[in-house]
Image: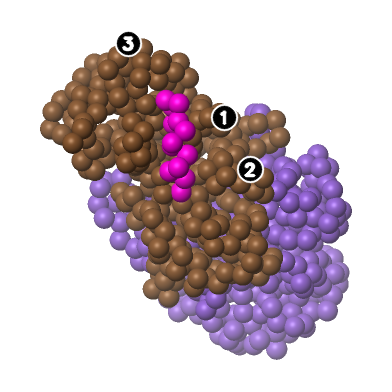
Chain colours: A purple, B brown
């Protein structure tokens, strides 16, 4: 079997490390491996399959000879270096929002729209974490009954922000427990024992960019450019696993039992829906799994053909690293790498 | 000025203590004071206006001579003792769900439907915490433009469950920080660093009773028996303050600026909506206040005349104790006590 020279940009970050972990877990045919990061993390070593690799400061010439480059760093890094990598012949799988909505850039969840990979021109975008888990569930429902509208509210963990946010939640939690003031640094307000209805920057219309991403990316991935959808995204004091309360209107009837039957067959989705035994998707149980969990499926009688769903997924795995590695696997399967 | 003999049932609980605190804060004309609780808490003393009161085990004859009885105990206590108190001439203000949906029992948020008090027959119900904060915001909007549909998702703090839940969150948080297993007791799953889409029992249709309460009580308070409304309620690891992501459809246009202008004039509501300066309602800032905070007001273009709102309130104060005391004040103002 062929192997590939792989680069990981942002190799010191939470998602970068998770990509390495998942490449190993899934036995991805890694030939050479180049790890890159900002100057701040350069020089650190990172283990991969029992061998230490030194992280280099990211720069264009390091992409020479690279077949596949995972970008899990800042938007600036993607903006500057992804085109350089592609120019040198690497296929880029980018976790940032920079290229997602660009014409001609495939935005892919491999279980949902792998065919979009076929037209790639060197850069492929992996969607926002909160989008990935929602479209995994919406796509099979949409195939059964067209979706007319989506209203989503999210409960997103701090690991989506990065390592500093995880440390901040931990430190602030200790402070609050000890009756000390919890100083905010990564977030504009205390996150410990609090809820922030604020993820990413605010647009002039009052939506956050996280909300805009969920709306626009869902439409692109599902090829439903006019899908009516609205979102409210909130940061909650959990470490790993985003939860979503999703209300949808369908074009025709679909009973909860039928929805569960459809979702049980959906790749990447696990139905956890037995309220009588207190079984429903939970962040602490989604953490460490690749499946997106869905439950609390019920009819919403406030609108014709309404449904409520509760969706939870590991934002570092399927929401980021696993999806990126699955894109690489799909590229190989489709002869596009 | 006349004073009233007051009883508080559940005086050892979080809400009972908050009622005593708020009666003092608001200079409520308390004459005699009788504190009651279950056998477990009987014998404890509780201070009120600098004087210690011993908590008695609740029983019917203790309501003799009582003018006003606040019930902030279990549903069973309300079911058994509220009619006994009313029979003895006390006006009961009950925090439990037992009487809320009963014909002839006023379900009151004093800023919204004080006129419902006039027909009371001895028992008045105070709504569910998550309902109160939502109707405070919906009512003034409804007066400007009829509301056609409501979709709400909640982020509810553990103090809504009671003192044991507050202790459980604290203990589990310490356990997780120390890498010890977090044993669940009050809740069926770990609440520390987790989200439970489960509040109160499950009905056969998959909704929780908390969701059913929000739906039914909102309709009753707003006198909109057919209002299309759906709810998903979730418990989050916060101590005090419930947050709600509320999506509404109106019968006609209302710009966010107009909504904010209406809400600034609404009693009991404070608009906190300046995203450019990171100002939006937060549980830690709502805690200790009587105002319900609303912000993130924005147009939802996914439906004609759609709006998104973010509503946060102190569930122990306005969501429970303050509302109950305000009901008592409204009874006095309307000569119904």
**Which-is-in-front pick, marks 3 and 1?**
1
Q: Let me know if marks 2 and 3 both belong to one chain.
A: yes
Q: Quadrant of the C terminus of chain A?
A: bottom right
Whichever of labels 3 and 1 marks the residue nearer the N terminus, that label is 3
- Give the numbered dot on residue B225: 2
Q: Give the residue at mark 3.
A: B61
Tag of residue B103: 1
Q: Residue at x 41, y 49 (%)?
A: B111
- CB atoms at circles 2 and 1 under 8 Å apart? no
Give how far across and how far down residue B21 sits, in percent.
Answer: 25, 38
Q: Position of residue B291 (x, y in %)?
A: 36, 53
Distance of label 2 from label 1 (alpha carbons):
13 Å
Magenta residues?
B112-125
The answer to whether B23 appears left or right of B250 in the picture is: left
Q: Secondary structure at mark 2?
A: loop
Which chain hosts label 1? B
- Going from N to C along the chain, the mark reached first, 2 or 1, is 1
Q: What percent of the width, then of the height, locates residue B29?
A: 21, 35
Determine the secondary structure under disc 1.
loop
Q: Earlier in the sequence, mark 2 or mark 3?
A: 3
**Residue A161 vs residue B124, the one in the foreground:** B124
Q: Chain of mark 2?
A: B
Q: Residues within 10 Å of mark 3 (few under 14, many from 20)?
A: few
| Residue A304 shown in magenta | no
In the picture provided, is B323 more to the left or to the right than A250?
left
Q: Quadrant of residue B246?
A: bottom right
């Amino acid at each position: 079997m062929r192997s590939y020279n792989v680069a990981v940009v942002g190799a010191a970050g939470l998602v970068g490390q998770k990509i390495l972990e998942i490449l190993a877990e899934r036995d991805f045919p890694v030939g050479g491996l180049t790890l890159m990061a900002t100057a701040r993390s350069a020089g650190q070593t990172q283990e991969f399959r029992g061998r230490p690799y030194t992280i280099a400061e990211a720069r264009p010439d390091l992409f020479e000879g690279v077949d596949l480059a995972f970008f899990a760093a800042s938007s600036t890094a993607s903006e500057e270096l992804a085109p350089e990598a592609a120019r040198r012949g690497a296929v880029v799988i980018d976790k940032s929002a920079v290229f997602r909505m660009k014409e001609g850039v495939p935005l892919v969840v491999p279980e949902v729209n792998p065919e979009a990979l076929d037209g790639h021109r060197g850069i492929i975008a992996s969607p926002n974490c909160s989008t990935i888990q929602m479209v995994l569930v919406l796509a099979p429902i949409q195939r059964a009954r067209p979706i007319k509208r989506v209203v989503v509210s999210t409960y997103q963990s701090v690991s989506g922000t990065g390592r500093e946010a995880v440390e901040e939640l931990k430190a602030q939690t200790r402070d609050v427990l000890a009756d000390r003031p919890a100083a905010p640094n990564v977030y504009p307000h205390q996150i410990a024992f609090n809820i922030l209805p604020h993820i990413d920057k605010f647009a002039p219309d009052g939506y956050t960019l996280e909300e805009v991403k969920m709306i626009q990316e869902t439409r692109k991935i599902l090829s439903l450019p006019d899908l009516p959808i609205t979102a409210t995204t909130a940061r909650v004091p959990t470490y790993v696993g985003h939860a979503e309360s999703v209300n949808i209107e369908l074009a025709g009837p679909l009973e909860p039992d039928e929805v569960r039957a459809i979702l049980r067959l959906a790749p990447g989705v696990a139905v956890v829906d037995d309220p009588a035994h207190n079984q429903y998707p939970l962040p602490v149980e989604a953490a460490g799994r690749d499946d997106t969990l869905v439950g609390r499926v019920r009819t919403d009688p406030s609108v014709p053909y309404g449904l409520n769903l509760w969706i939870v997924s590991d934002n570092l795995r399927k929401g980021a690293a696993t999806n990126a590695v699955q894109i690489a696997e799909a590229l190989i399967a489709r002869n596009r790498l």
